Image: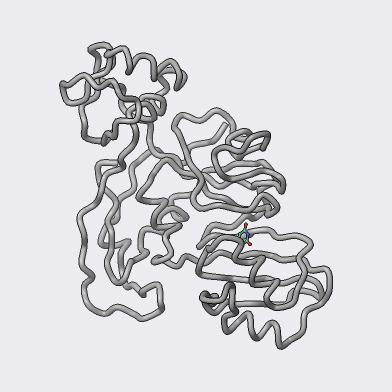
């Protein structure tokens, strides 16, 4: 079972915002614009399910039979979009119980497990999670053949800070290679390397940790990005492991193990800016 650090909500206070630098590295000296927070929007069935009110098929039937009201109106469509934090949702005349506090988790995904929700005959990260008090989803993805750190949360706004390319959060990978790569190839990786005819990777930090071992730190997360980078540099991977996302490190987490992020780990992502704009977390969440 996941130990909760502290159930108190996250807030982006002026103290947390502090002095900022933009994702592209330009420092910001003026007061950044604050844009109003957005609320999470979820389907009605998922909202009911995340409050632990039964299986999805059971809840779908309840909705279709007209036993759920949203803001006083009967809704019979399970996929109907609601704002769980502000809409008044009633199930058979009773208001929904309050949502459990958001979850922010780190999982060590083993090789062979997929990070998307479904895949026929595949083992997904959801299959290896213990029962949790809220519905969570993976923040970004990790290839089936890649092991390592994957973050999971129930908080859509926080997930956006971590995963959206504009925030350019650093991801660190350890790549094991079949054969040594040339120094020139490492330089190319550092400068940026073509991933496809029209896409060049952003400059990466690359360190040779051993003859057959590289550490790559990149600020983007395109599909198969590291594999493509290593291939384009003439290297052949034998394994790939993500060891950090921002200030969250895989550390000693064993395969399939899950832990709560600390407040400090969660909060470091809140000072991210998008093009110089701070997006505050809704203080009511
Ligand atoms: N880059 C890859 O190639 N694969 C991953 O899973 C993550 C980054």
Q: Residue at horizontal 53%, vertical 63%?
A: 222
Which quadrant of the render holds ligand 1?
bottom right
Residue 281 is left or right of residue 3, and the answer is left
Task: Examine the rendered structure and indicate whether residue 193 appears above or below residue 279.
Answer: below
Residue extending farthest to the bottom is: 184
Q: Residue at horizontal 69%, vertical 65%?
A: 174
Residue 33 is left or right of residue 44, and the answer is left
Q: Residue at horizontal 60%, vertical 41%?
A: 258
Task: Examine the rendered structure and indicate whether residue 273 appears above or below residue 137.
Answer: below
Q: How many marks?
A: 0
Residue extending farthest to the front is: 197
> Can you say which quadrant of the picture contains the N terminus?
top right
Where residue 102 appears, as percent x and y from the top left, is 40, 39
Residue extending farthest to the left is: 72
Q: Quadrant of residue 166?
A: bottom left
The residue lying toward the viewer, choosing from 268 and 40, is: 40
Task: Examine the rendered structure and indicate whether residue 173 appears above or below residue 68.
Answer: below
Where residue 62 appears, as percent x and y from the top left, is 35, 14
């Amino acid at each position: 079972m996941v130990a909760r650090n502290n159930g108190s909500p996250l807030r982006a206070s002026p103290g947390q915002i502090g002095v900022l630098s933009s994702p592209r590295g330009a420092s910001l000296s003026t007061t950044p614009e604050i844009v109003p927070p957005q609320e999470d929007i979820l389907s009605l069935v998922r909202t009911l399910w995340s409050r632990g009110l039964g299986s999805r098929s059971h809840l779908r039937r309840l909705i279709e039979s007209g036993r759920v009201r949203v803001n006083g109106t009967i809704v019979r469509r399970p996929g109907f979009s609601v704002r769980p934090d502000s809409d008044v949702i009633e199930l058979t005349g009773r208001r929904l119980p309050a949502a459990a506090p958001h979850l922010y988790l780190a999982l060590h995904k083993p090789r062979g497990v997929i990070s998307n929700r479904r895949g026929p005959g595949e083992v997904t990260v959801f299959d290896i999670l213990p029962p949790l008090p809220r519905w969570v989803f993976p923040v970004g993805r990790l290839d089936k053949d890649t092991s390592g750190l994957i973050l999971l949360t129930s908080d859509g706004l926080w997930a956006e800070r971590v995963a959206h390319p504009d925030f350019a959060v650093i991801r660190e990978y350890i790549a094991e290679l079949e054969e040594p790569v040339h120094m020139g190839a490492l330089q190319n990786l550092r400068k940026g390397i073509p991933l496809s005819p029209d896409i060049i990777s952003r400059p990466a930090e690359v360190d040779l940790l051993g003859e057959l071992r590289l550490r790559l730190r990149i600020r983007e997360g395109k599909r198969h990005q590291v594999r493509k980078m290593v291939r384009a540099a003439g290297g052949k991977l034998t394994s790939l492991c993500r060891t950090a996302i921002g200030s969250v490190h895989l550390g000693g987490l064993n395969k399939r193990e899950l832990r709560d992020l600390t407040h400090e780990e969660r909060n470091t992502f809140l000072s991210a800016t998008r093009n110089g704009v701070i997006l505050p977390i809704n203080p009511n969440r």
